[in-house]
Image (cartoon, rainbow, N blue to C red):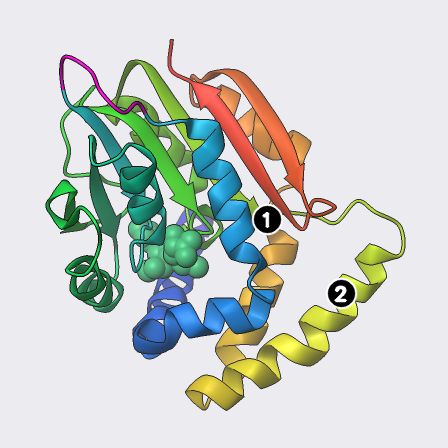
């Protein structure tokens, strides 16, 4: 059936994504710095500043950092809360989590993080169990984005916050041309240099282009039941932060 074909294609997509991150796990952080010129750090800092995790309270403040990879969003959140926030770093890829758990041993507050292997489309967490759900440069890789947003809504408490940081579509004339040329001519060769294989990076470049435009993605978030959805462009919308609330 037509539906059957679509399912296979989506499973293929997840397989390809998994292969990319299995291959690069040990060099992932280096790769991020190289490919973004370090700017990913600025975007992540801005996201966590906007989240403004509380530094104290009467009960635990729990965050699910989905597609959390090697844990750098989690580390920022925990540090910003001066060790108050509890972050579950979850990712479909055990290699990324292994690198993250190893790195976490040298964090300022290592006990505040835990690492759980899971698919964003089907979370092993209870309803209404988190105060915030973050996902940075991860949702683009999830085959069924609607399912992931639905799960995010399910596991958030009322009053909980969703934050999605993702590559977006450059909206500054001139910069868009430069960015396109940069992506095509530099990202795959850099991937080959660091990991020995360019093809997965070509795939990543394409996945950025296929990701829904900000207005369409805003609608998807609202369709999952979230309120007060906002879009904040970073660096000419090379990346974008989407924020929303479960009310
Ligand atoms: N959040 C980290 C960061 O900002 O550096 C890692 C982002 S990395 C580009 C994308 C991550 O998404 C990978 O670690 C990958 O394993 C994960 N991922 C891909 N598909 C997923 C899925 N269906 N469920 C959960 N994680 C997934």
Q: Residue at x 10, y 45 (%)?
A: 111
Q: Is residue 8 visible?
A: no
Q: What main secondary structure does the magenta stretch of the protein show?
A: loop
SS state under label 2: helix
Any magenta on residue 145?
no
Q: Residue at x 43, y 36 (%)?
A: 48
Q: Residue at x 17, y 66 (%)?
A: 102
The C terminus - image quarter: top left
> Which residue position is annotated with label 2?
180
- In the figure, 18 relative to 230: above or below? below
Q: CA distance from mark 2 to mark 1?
A: 15 Å
- Indicate which disc, 2 or 1, sits on the residue closer to the N terminus: 2
**Where is residue 177 drawn, in percent x and y?**
84, 62
> Which residue position is annotated with label 1?
211
For the residue pair 6 and 93, the one nearer the viewer reads as 93
For the residue pair 119 and 161, the one nearer the viewer reads as 161
- In the figure, 63 relative to 102: above or below? above
**Where is residue 20 drawn, in percent x and y?**
39, 72
- In the figure, 123 relative to 95: above or below? above
For the residue pair 226 and 108, the one nearer the viewer reads as 108
Depth check, mark 2 against mark 1: the one in front is 2
Horizontal relation, residue 42 to residue 65: left or right: right
Q: Which residues are magenta?
A: 54-59
**Res 113 label:** none
């Amino acid at each position: 059936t037509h539906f059957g074909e679509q399912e296979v294609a989506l499973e293929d997509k997840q397989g390809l994504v998994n292969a990319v991150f299995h291959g690069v796990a040990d060099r992932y952080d280096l790769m991020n710095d190289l490919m973004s010129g370090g700017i990913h750090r600025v975007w992540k800092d801005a996201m966590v500043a906007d989240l403004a995790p509380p530094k104290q309270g009467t009960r635990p403040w729990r965050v699910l950092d989905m597609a959390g990879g090697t844990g750098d969003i989690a580390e920022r959140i925990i540090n910003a809360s001066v060790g108050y926030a509890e972050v579950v770093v979850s990712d479909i890829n055990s290699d990324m989590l292994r690198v993250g758990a190893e790195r976490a041993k040298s964090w300022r507050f290592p006990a505040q993080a835990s690492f759980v292997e899971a698919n964003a489309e089907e979370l092993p967490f209870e309803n209404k169990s988190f105060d915030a759900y973050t996902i940075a440069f991860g949702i683009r890789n999830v085959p069924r984005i609607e399912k992931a947003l639905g799960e995010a809504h399910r596991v958030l408490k009322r009053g909980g916050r969703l934050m999605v940081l993702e590559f977006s579509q450059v909206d500054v004339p001139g910069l868009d041309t430069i960015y396109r040329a940069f992506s095509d001519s530099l990202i795959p060769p850099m991937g080959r240099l660091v990991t020995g294989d360019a093809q997965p990076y070509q795939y990543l470049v394409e996945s950025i282009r296929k990701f829904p435009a900000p207005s369409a993605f805003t609608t998807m978030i609202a369709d999952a039941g979230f309120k007060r959805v906002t879009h904040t462009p970073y660096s000419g919308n090379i990346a974008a932060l989407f924020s929303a609330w479960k009310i």
